[in-house]
């Protein structure tokens, strides 16, 4: 993996870097170093079954200039896990950047962190876990209401196992559930969270076929 030099960071000079990975948000060869991140592994503790707790430092850079630095802790990561990133709310350019870490295969949990990267206003916004398998998934959706207001909710779509015996559609029915409604308000350089529904509790659900959900023509 090709790495760029990190800018000098006096805040974390005592950290010992074990390894470094690069996260790109743009993938054109002539643009990918306009906006990217370097993730430095600082500490790794693994069990006998290769499940690891990891501490990272992440440096966000734009045109090779350090913009923002923070730390990420990942619990119960599988050996062989990888970093990847994307813009949130806009696929071309966004101050909201999602970085994810997990084993690159269906059915494995991914550890996600949303950052707002905008000079001195930069901060960590939210952390969560996601998982996907062949179109079935659990993940968080975000919507920007204004420059200072962001809303999010967890959406899950998995086979409707509770009605499997009565399912006449060949097992294609899914259960779509919504939970963890959160409103974020930006004050200064921080995004404050306000949970609008009980954590971990489903507040709305419906049964919908896989083909209808993905608008698949039969």
Image (cartoon, helix red, strand yellow):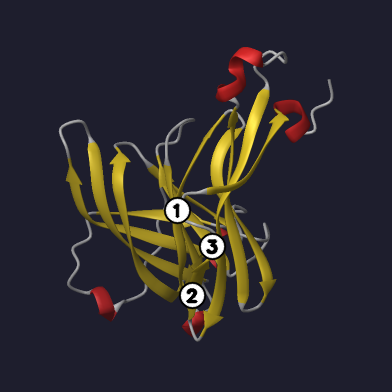
Which quadrant would the C terminus be assigned to in this image?
top right
Q: Circle 2 is placed at which residue position?
A: 192
Q: Which mark is nearer the camera, 1 or 3?
A: 1
User: Residue 86: x, y in percent?
Assistant: 56, 55
Rounded to the nearest whole Å, what is the CA distance between mark 2 and mark 1? 16 Å
Crowding at mark 3 (Cα within 10 Å: few <14, some 14-19, many 20+):
many
Res. 16 image quadrant: bottom left
Residue 214 visible in the current orientation: no
Q: Nearer the viewer, residue 27 or 102?
A: 102
Q: Circle 1 is placed at which residue position?
A: 128
Q: Which SS class for mark 1? A: strand
User: Residue 139: x, y in percent?
Assistant: 54, 46
Q: Which mark is nearer the camera, 3 or 2?
A: 2
Rounded to the nearest whole Å, what is the CA distance between mark 1 and mark 3? 14 Å
Q: Circle 3 is placed at which residue position?
A: 97
Image height of 68 relative to 162, above or below? below
Numbered tag placed on residue 28 in the rendering: none
């Amino acid at each position: 993996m090709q790495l760029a030099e990190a800018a000098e960071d006096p805040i974390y000079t005592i950290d010992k870097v074990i390894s470094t990975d690069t996260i790109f948000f743009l993938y054109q060869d002539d643009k990918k170093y306009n906006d990217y991140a370097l993730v430095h592994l600082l500490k790794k503790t693994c069990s006998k079954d290769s499940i690891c707790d990891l501490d990272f430092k992440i440096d966000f850079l734009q045109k090779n200039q350090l913009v923002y630095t923070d730390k990420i802790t990942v619990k119960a990561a599988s050996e062989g896990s990888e970093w990847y990133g994307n813009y949130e709310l806009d696929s071309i350019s966004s101050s909201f950047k999602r970085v994810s870490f997990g084993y690159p295969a269906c059915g494995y949990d991914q550890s996600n962190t949303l950052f707002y990267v905008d000079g001195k206003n930069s901060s960590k916004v939210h952390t969560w876990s996601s998982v996907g398998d062949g179109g079935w998934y659990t993940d968080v959706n975000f919507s920007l209401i204004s420059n200072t207001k962001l809303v999010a909710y967890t959406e899950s779509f998995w086979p409707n196992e509770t009605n499997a015996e009565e399912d006449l559609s060949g097992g294609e029915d899914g259960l779509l559930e919504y939970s963890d409604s959160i409103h974020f308000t930006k004050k200064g350089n921080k995004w404050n969270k306000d949970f609008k529904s009980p954590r971990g509790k489903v507040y709305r659900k419906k049964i919908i076929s896989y083909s209808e959900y993905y608008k698949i023509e039969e």
